[in-house]
Image (spheres, rainbow, N blue to C red):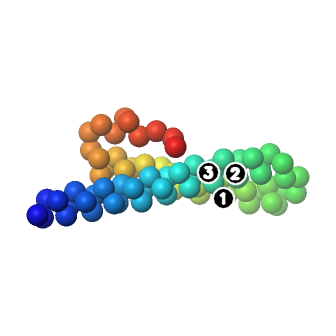
C-alpha cells in the first residue's frame, strides 16, 4: 500500500511540475515577444530580467522532473 501511495504522490508531483513547466515555457515565449516590441529602454530591461527569471525557473523545474523520473529523462520535451 505504501508503494502505491509513493507512486501516486510521485505521479501527482510530476503532473504539477509538467504544468508548471508549460507555464514557464509560455512565459518565456511571451516575454521574448514583448521584448522585441517594446521601445522604452527601462521596460526593455525589465522584460530582459523577467525573461532570465523564467529561464531559471524552467531549468529548476526540469531538474526536479529529472530527479523524480530518474532514467528515461530524455523523453521530457517542450510542451
Look at 56% across and 54% down and name the residue there: 24
Judge whether 9 appears above or below 52 on screen: below
Look at 20% across and 61% down and name the residue there: 6
- For this view, does 8 lie left or right of residue 78? left
Disc 3 target residue: 26
Task: Find the distance from the CA under tag 3 to the CA under tag 1.
Answer: 13 Å
Look at 35% across and 60% down and name the residue there: 13
Look at 29% across and 52% down and name the residue there: 68
Cβ atoms at labels 2 and 3 below 8 Å apart:
yes
Judging from the image, what secondary structure is the residue with disc 3 in?
Answer: helix
Judging from the image, what secondary structure is the residue with disc 1 in?
Answer: helix
Image coordinates of residue 43 in percent, x first then y, are 80, 60
- Labels 3, 1: front one: 3
Which residue is outermost to the right? Answer: 39
- Labels 1, 2: front one: 2
Image coordinates of residue 9 in percent, x first then y, are 27, 62
Closer-to-camera residue (65/45): 65
Image coordinates of residue 48 in percent, x first then y, are 70, 53
Task: Find the distance from the CA under tag 2 to the CA under tag 3.
Answer: 6 Å
Local crowd size for mark 2, using a 10 Å CA cut-off: few (<14), some (14–19), many (≥20):
few
Closer-to-camera residue (50/77): 77
Mark seen at residue 30: 2
Mark 1 vs 2, N-terminal side: 2
- Evaluate whether residue 34 shows in this view: yes
- For this view, does 9 lie left or right of residue 17? left
Local crowd size for mark 1, using a 10 Å CA cut-off: few (<14), some (14–19), many (≥20):
some
- For this view, does 30 lie left or right of residue 77? right
Disc 1 target residue: 50
- For this view, does 11 lie left or right of residue 45? left
Judging from the image, what secondary structure is the residue with disc 2 in?
Answer: helix
Image coordinates of residue 1 in percent, x first then y, are 11, 64
Local crowd size for mark 3, using a 10 Å CA cut-off: few (<14), some (14–19), many (≥20):
some
Amino acid at each position: 500500500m505504501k508503494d502505491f501511495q509513493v507512486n501516486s504522490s510521485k505521479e501527482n508531483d510530476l503532473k504539477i511540475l509538467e504544468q508548471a513547466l508549460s507555464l514557464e515555457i509560455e512565459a518565456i515565449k511571451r516575454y521574448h515577444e514583448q521584448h522585441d516590441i517594446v521601445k522604452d529602454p527601462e521596460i526593455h530591461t525589465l522584460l530582459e530580467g523577467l525573461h532570465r527569471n523564467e529561464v531559471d525557473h524552467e531549468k529548476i523545474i526540469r531538474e526536479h522532473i529529472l530527479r523524480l523520473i530518474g532514467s528515461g529523462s530524455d523523453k521530457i520535451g517542450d510542451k
